[in-house]
Amino acid sequence: MDREFLIDLFADFGPVTIRKMFSGYGISADGTNFALSLRAGLYFRADEQTIPQFEAEGSRPFQYQTRTKTVTVNSYWQLPARLFDDSEELASWARAALAAAQRAALRKPPRARKAKPKVSMKAAAKPKRKAIGTGEARPTKKASRS
């Protein structure tokens, strides 16, 4: 599927952002990724609320092969082929996929920020020392001979 086809496909849903991803595209709305278009097909985000709808249509979760095993990604399910001909119902499924993606984002713990090094109050209050070798001449003591 190319970018223009995907834009047309989601016309009834509303504006989407399509970005190059792996061997296809990631599709997002309102900053939330809710669909994947890959060589194997179009996959929508799913969760415990929407998976039964995919199962009723005979859809399967996204799978890919590694050298040693088949990996199943239960959070993305293949869109039923019949929806490619029904843009209104496809838009309804896309809204459900976006809602599933938003629910998943709410369940994710917030990203941990790197902590800045703490400076103690004592260290912050101390004046900084002048660096040695700043070019200022120091007075020298001359030994007096008498």
Image (cartoon, rainbow, N blue to C red):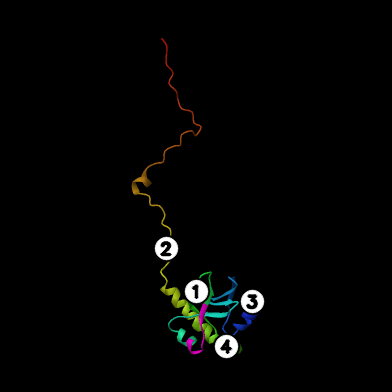
Q: Residue at x 53, y 87 (%)?
A: 92
Query: Contact (CB < 8 A) between labels 3 and 2?
Result: no
SS for tag 4? Answer: helix
* Separation of residues labelled 4 and 2 (CA atoms): 40 Å
* Separation of residues labelled 4 and 1 (CA atoms): 26 Å
Q: Which residue is mark 4?
A: 83
Q: Which residue is mark 2?
A: 112
Between label 1 and label 2, give the one nearer the viewer: 1
Q: Which residue is mark 1?
A: 71
Residue 96: in sight, yes or no? Answer: yes
Between label 1 and label 3, give the one nearer the viewer: 1
Give the quarter of the figure containing the N terminus: bottom right
Q: Is residue 52 above or below residue 33?
A: below
Q: Position of residue 6 (x, y in %)?
A: 62, 80
Q: Is residue 115 above or below residue 139?
A: below
Q: Earlier in the sequence, mark 4 or mark 2?
A: 4
Disc 3 marks a residue whose amino acid type is Arg
Query: Contact (CB < 8 A) between labels 4 and 1?
Result: no
For residue 36, the mark is none
Q: Position of residue 43 (x, y in %)?
A: 54, 80
Q: Residue at x 64, y 76 (%)?
A: 3
What segment carries the magenta color? 55-62
Near mark 2 (Cα within 10 A), the count class, few <14, some 14-19 or many ≥20, is few
- Most distant residue in the left direction: 122
Near mark 4 (Cα within 10 A), the count class, few <14, some 14-19 or many ≥20, is some
Near mark 1 (Cα within 10 A), the count class, few <14, some 14-19 or many ≥20, is few
Q: Position of residue 39 (x, y in %)?
A: 60, 77
Q: Earlier in the sequence, mark 3 or mark 2?
A: 3
